Amino acid sequence: MSLKRFLKQNKKVRENTTYPATKSLVDEEGKPLLWTIRALTTKENDEIREDCMIEIPVKGKPNVYRNRLNTSKYIAKMVSACVVEPNLYDKELQDSYGVMTPEDLLKEMVDSPSEYQDFATFVQEYCGFDTTIEEKVEEAKN
């Protein structure tokens, strides 16, 4: 097997996609606006995951902690990082909703719990997660 096949220039580039994240933001014809979504890189995902880890004290063992993923925070950060358009980092857009972070803006713009869940699921699947984080948490509980 030739090493040349593994060179970066031979790697497929994942194209952005679109998704109608909410029915509450529509165009002139009343159709939901399409949001542009990109896939995360492994490095970006690792950084987000690390940022969302919290230490939980182990019962009965003083000064002993275990790491736990703050799932809600992780999903909000992951989805926000994948949104290309609208630019959730835009100060004017954040100011119009009275928020200061991309994650808070996302939750204000997609304020229907079912739409937010559907959008988060779409983004996770687009990033290559076969099962969503919520599904893994539920599976671990059972």
Image (spheres, helix red, strand yellow):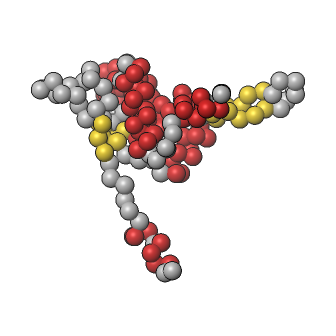
Q: Quadrant of the C terminus?
A: top right
Position of residue 36 in the picture relative to residue 129 (left or right): left
Q: Residue furthest toward the bottom?
A: 2
Position of residue 61 in the picture relative to residue 25 (left or right): right
Q: Quadrant of residue 26?
A: top left
Count of marks, rendered view: 0
Q: Nearer the viewer, residue 119 or 91?
A: 119
Q: Quadrant of residue 140?
A: top right
Residue 136, given in percent of the width and then of the height, sits at 58, 35
Q: Nearer the viewer, residue 138 or 90?
A: 138
Q: Residue furthest toward the front?
A: 142
For the point 32% across and 53% down, the residue is: 15
Position of residue 61 in the picture relative to residue 48 (left or right): right
Residue 85, given in percent of the width and then of the height, sits at 30, 38
**Above or below: residue 108 compared with residue 71:** above
For the point 83% across and 32% down, the residue is: 64
For the point 31% across and 21% down, the residue is: 96
Q: Nearer the viewer, residue 83 or 119?
A: 119
